[in-house]
Image: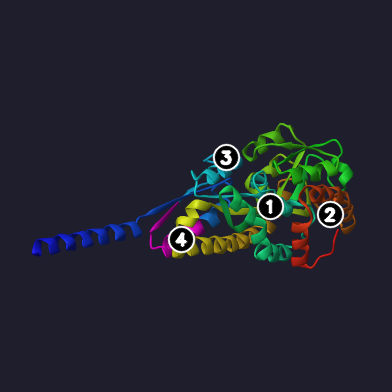
Amino acid sequence: MKSIFRSMLAMVLLNTALLSGYANAQIVIKVGHDQPDRSTHHLAALKWKELVEARTKGQIQVRLFPAMLLGSGTQMVEQTQAGALEVSILPTGWVAPLAPSVQVLDLPFLFQSREALYKVVDGPTGASILKPLNKVNIEGVAFWESGFKQFTGNFPIREPKDYGGRKIRTMPAPVVQEQFKAFGASPVAIDFKELYSALQQRVVDGQENPISTIALMRFYEVQKYLTLSDHGFIAYVFMFNKPFLDKLSPENRTIVVDAAKEAGKYQRELIVKAESEQLDMFRKSGMQVERLTAEQRGRFEQASRPVYDWFTAKYGVESINMIRTSIGSTAK
């Protein structure tokens, strides 16, 4: 009897040890993004790593892969979908082929301010925009950013007609390509890491990007003109492989999701703080910097109307109406 009891006790202790070991097993999360290690995106990713590792007491370890070390934006989205990559942080333009709904954030002149944008992406409307990703094995949990996009070119940009016949680099997001078609330009999809040389060799005449990206990638060295247009916003999606996220314990899931939102807000502070200094650097380098007047902006908004017509014909008006309701704006 004692032998049976000892045997049963040993089994209980072994099972307890195995269960304890499983519960405390280290989880490794690989994170890929497309920005250099000097970027606000990477600094925010480091903040996320710090928060997650501290709050899980080291149970979750984070490995960061910046600057497209794991492949192009498209490849990282595919890796996240397949589960080869647990997390990717990428612009909506790279996600659009899988979930067209995110393109609504790329519509030109949709947001008048950061405050209006944050009201949308941080609330229920933002969650609704991300929800279709669940159908393709991805779960978006937060929006990060690069900031408002500005026009740059090897030619002055003051009115839509200035784009006539020009070749302009874009991400492979159809809504962005439609935008430049509406201005009379020819959009050319070029990988981000190849953009500097494409501008330098005049493969394309211009591009659009936020101030922080223009500074970080030194596009001001190969573009003579910058027009402060605030015409669009480059939102980044912080996304998980959905099966991976679903397998985490409820506690760890809450930690990684909340930390993604916190790190995103930290990144916003970094971007706003840096922009005025970066504009000064552009001017000192010889770049000509202008801001659209209200009249000029109005012409661009008018020229953008066909983009909205194209979008609503293809995807309906629901997402646009959700955004306008959130920010209390009127129809264009």
The amino acid at mark 1 is Val
Of circles 1 and 4, the one toward us is 1
Mark seen at residue 39: none
Determine the secondary structure under disc 2: loop
Does 22 lie within the magenta span?
Answer: no
Instruction: Give the vertical position of 132 relative to 152 (above or below).
Output: below
Neighbor class of circle 4 (other Cα within 10 Å; few <14, some 14-19, many 20+) is many
Which corner quadrant holds the N terminus? bottom left
Which residue is label 2 attached to? 292
Q: Residue 194 at what x, y percent from top left?
A: 64, 36
The amino acid at mark 2 is Leu
Q: Residue at x 46, y 60 (%)?
A: 52
Q: Which badge, 1 or 4, is on the more N-terminal residue?
A: 4
The amino acid at mark 4 is Val
Instruction: Give the vertical position of 185 relative to 131 (above or below).
Output: above
Highlighted magenta segment, given as a residue range: 46-62
Residues at marks 4 and 3 touching, judged by CB atoms closer than 8 Å? no
Which residue is label 4 attached to? 52
Of circles 4 and 3, the one toward us is 3
Of circles 2 and 3, the one toward us is 3
Mark seen at residue 102: 1
Q: Residue 232 at what x, y percent from top left?
A: 75, 53
The foreground one among 12 and 173 is 12
The amino acid at mark 3 is Gln
Q: Which badge, 1 or 3, is on the more N-terminal residue?
A: 3
**Residue at the bottom extreme of this rendering:** 328
Neighbor class of circle 1 (other Cα within 10 Å; few <14, some 14-19, many 20+) is many
Cα separation between marks 2 and 4: 42 Å
Mark seen at residue 75: 3
